[in-house]
C-alpha cells in the first residue's frame, strides 16, 4: 500500500513538471524552426512581458480573457505570406496545433483559445495591414490583418462619403457610421481608431438565424413579450436580397441566398462574470421561441457569429455544418479530406474529414 501511495505521489509531483516541460519544448522547437524568417518582435511566449497584452489586444469577448481561459504556448505575428507559409510548415512538421487570428471577431474565441485540451500556438495576422486601392476598377484589396483603423488612413484619397438619405435618418460618412456603430460620441474624431482598441469590452453570448417567411403579427407580439420580460437579449435584423440573391448558393461556401428576407443576430452582454448563466439562459430561451419563425431543415446559422451551442467536433453529429453551409458542407468535406487528410487545420467547428 505504501509503495502504491509513493508511486501516486511521484506521478502527481511530476505532472506539473512534465506539462511545463512540454510547453517549453513547443516554444523552443517552433521558435527554432522559424529562425530563418525571424524578425524582431514577432515571436512571443508567456515569459515575455507583453505576451498577455498581445493576446488580449484582439480578444473582444471578456468571457475568453479570464485567468482560467486556455492560453496559447506562443504567439507568432508574421509580416508577409512567406512567414505564414513557413509557420504552417513548421507547425505541421513538429505536430503543433495552430489557431489563426485576424481581428479576433470569433464570438466563441476559437481564434485565440481552445476547449480541445491540446497545446497550441496562435498565428496573429495583425501586422499584415496593407491596403491597396485601385481607382481604375474601384476596388480595394486589404490584407487580413487590416481593420478599420487602417482603412481610415486612405478614405480621403480614394473613396467618397457614404451617406444615408432618408428623411428620418441623418446623413453621415462611412467612417462616421463606423464610429456610430462603435458607440463613440460625435465629438470623438475617427483618428481614435488608429489606437487599435475597441470602444468597450464586455462579456457576451451571440447566436444567429435566417428568416425566409414574414413573421406574423402574433409572432412579433410574443417576441416583444419575451424580450421585455428578460430585458437583456438584443436582436439585430440585417436585410438581405439584391445582388446577394442573384449569386447561386453553390458558387461559394456562403449559402444564405435567394429567398432570405433577413438575418437575425441575438446578443446578450453583461459586465459581471457572475451573471453569465442568467444571460446565456435568457438568450437561449429567446432563440428557442423564434424556432417557429426561422429557417428549418436545416435551421440556418451564420458562421461569422460562431455558436458552439449548435454542435462541435467530437461532441455531436455533423448537423452543425449544414446550419452554416447547407449542402455546400458536403463539398467542403471533400475538399478538406483531399487537401488536409491528416486534419492538421482543426478546431471545435473546423470542417471534418469524410469518414
Image (cartoon, rainbow, N blue to C red):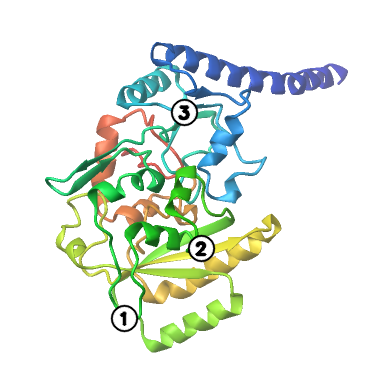
In the orientation shown, which residue stands out farthest toward the bottom? Answer: 218
Mark 3 neighbour class, 10 Å CA radius: few under 14, some 14 to 19, many 20 or more: some
Q: Which residue is mark 1?
A: 167
Q: State the residue in front, 1 or 196.
A: 196
Q: Is residue 138 above or below residue 259?
A: above
Q: Is residue 102 above or below residue 184?
A: above
Determine whether, in the image, residue 101 is placed left or right of residue 273.
left
Q: Nearer the viewer, mark 3 or mark 2?
A: 2
Q: Which residue is mark 2?
A: 185
Q: Position of residue 133 (x, y in %)?
A: 22, 42
- Residue at 42 percent across and 62 percent down: it is 208
Q: Position of residue 265 (x, y in %)?
A: 43, 64
> Image quarter for residue 54?
top right
Element type where label 1 sits in the image: loop
Mark 2 neighbour class, 10 Å CA radius: few under 14, some 14 to 19, many 20 or more: few
- Residue at 40 percent across and 58 percent down: it is 178
**Residue 328 visible in the picture:** yes
Quick one: quadrant of the C terminus?
Answer: top left
Q: Which mark is residue 97?
A: 3
User: Cα distance, mark 2 to mark 1?
Assistant: 22 Å
Q: Nearer the viewer, mark 1 or mark 3?
A: 1
Amino acid at each position: 500500500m505504501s509503495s502504491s501511495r509513493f508511486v501516486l505521489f511521484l506521478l502527481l509531483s511530476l505532472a506539473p513538471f512534465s506539462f511545463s516541460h512540454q510547453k517549453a519544448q513547443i516554444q523552443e522547437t517552433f521558435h527554432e524552426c522559424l529562425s530563418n524568417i525571424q524578425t524582431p518582435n514577432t515571436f512571443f511566449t508567456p515569459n515575455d512581458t507583453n505576451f498577455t497584452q498581445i493576446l488580449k489586444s484582439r480578444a473582444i469577448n471578456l468571457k475568453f480573457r479570464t485567468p482560467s481561459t486556455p492560453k496559447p504556448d506562443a504567439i507568432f505575428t508574421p509580416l508577409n505570406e512567406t512567414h505564414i507559409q513557413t509557420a504552417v510548415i513548421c507547425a505541421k512538421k513538429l505536430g503543433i496545433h495552430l489557431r489563426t487570428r485576424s481581428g479576433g471577431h470569433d464570438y466563441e474565441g476559437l481564434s485565440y483559445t481552445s476547449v480541445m485540451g491540446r497545446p497550441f500556438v496562435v498565428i496573429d495576422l495583425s501586422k499584415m495591414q496593407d491596403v491597396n486601392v485601385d481607382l481604375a476598377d474601384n476596388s480595394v484589396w486589404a490584407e487580413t490583418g487590416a481593420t478599420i483603423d487602417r482603412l481610415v488612413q486612405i478614405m480621403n484619397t480614394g473613396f467618397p462619403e457614404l451617406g444615408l438619405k432618408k428623411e428620418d435618418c441623418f446623413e453621415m460618412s462611412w467612417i462616421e457610421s463606423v464610429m456610430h456603430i462603435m458607440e463613440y460620441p460625435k465629438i470623438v474624431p475617427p483618428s481614435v481608431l488608429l489606437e487599435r482598441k475597441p470602444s468597450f469590452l464586455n462579456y457576451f453570448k451571440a447566436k444567429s438565424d435566417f428568416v425566409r417567411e414574414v413573421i406574423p403579427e402574433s409572432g412579433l407580439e410574443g417576441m416583444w413579450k419575451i424580450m421585455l420580460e428578460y430585458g437583456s437579449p438584443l436582436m439585430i435584423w440585417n436585410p438581405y436580397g439584391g445582388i446577394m440573391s442573384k449569386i447561386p448558393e453553390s458558387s461559394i461556401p456562403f449559402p444564405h441566398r435567394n429567398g432570405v428576407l433577413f438575418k437575425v443576430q441575438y446578443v446578450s452582454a453583461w459586465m459581471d462574470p457572475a451573471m453569465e448563466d442568467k444571460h446565456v439562459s435568457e438568450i437561449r430561451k429567446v432563440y428557442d421561441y423564434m424556432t417557429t419563425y426561422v429557417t428549418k431543415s436545416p435551421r440556418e446559422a451564420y458562421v461569422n457569429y460562431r455558436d458552439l451551442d449548435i454542435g462541435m467536433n467530437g461532441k455531436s453529429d455533423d448537423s452543425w455544418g449544414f446550419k452554416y453551409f447547407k449542402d455546400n458542407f458536403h463539398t467542403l468535406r471533400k475538399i478538406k479530406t483531399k487537401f488536409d487528410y491528416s486534419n492538421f487545420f482543426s478546431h471545435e467547428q473546423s470542417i471534418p474529414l469524410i469518414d
